[in-house]
Amino acid sequence: MYDRHILKSFNNACLSREMNTKSTWRKTGMFS
C-alpha cells in the first residue's frame, strides 16, 4: 500500500511534468 502510494505520486508527477512541457512547447510554437 505504501509502495503503491509512492508509485502513484511518481506517476502523477511525471504526468504533470509532461503536460506542462507540452503546454510550454505549444506556447513557444516549438510543439504543435
Image (cartoon, rainbow, N blue to C red):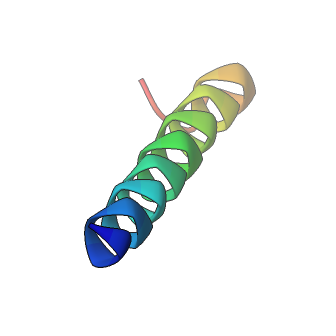
Q: Position of residue 4 (x, y in %)?
A: 26, 66
Residue plotted at (35% across, 55% down): 8
The foreground one among 27 and 7 is 7
Residue plotted at (47% across, 57% down): 9
**Vertical arrangement, residue 27 with respect to residue 12, above or below:** above
Which image quadrant: the N terminus? bottom left
Which image quadrant: the C terminus? top left
Residue plotted at (37% across, 73% down): 2
Extreme-front residue of the structure:
1
**Vertical arrangement, residue 23 with respect to residue 30, above or below:** above
Residue plotted at (42% across, 45% down): 15
How many numbered marks does the figure carry?
A: 0
Extreme-bottom residue of the structure:
3
Q: Position of residue 26 (x, y in %)?
A: 59, 24
Quadrant location of residue 21? top right
**Vertical arrangement, residue 25 with respect to residue 17, above or below:** above
Q: Position of residue 13 (x, y in %)?
A: 53, 55
The foreground one among 20 and 1 is 1
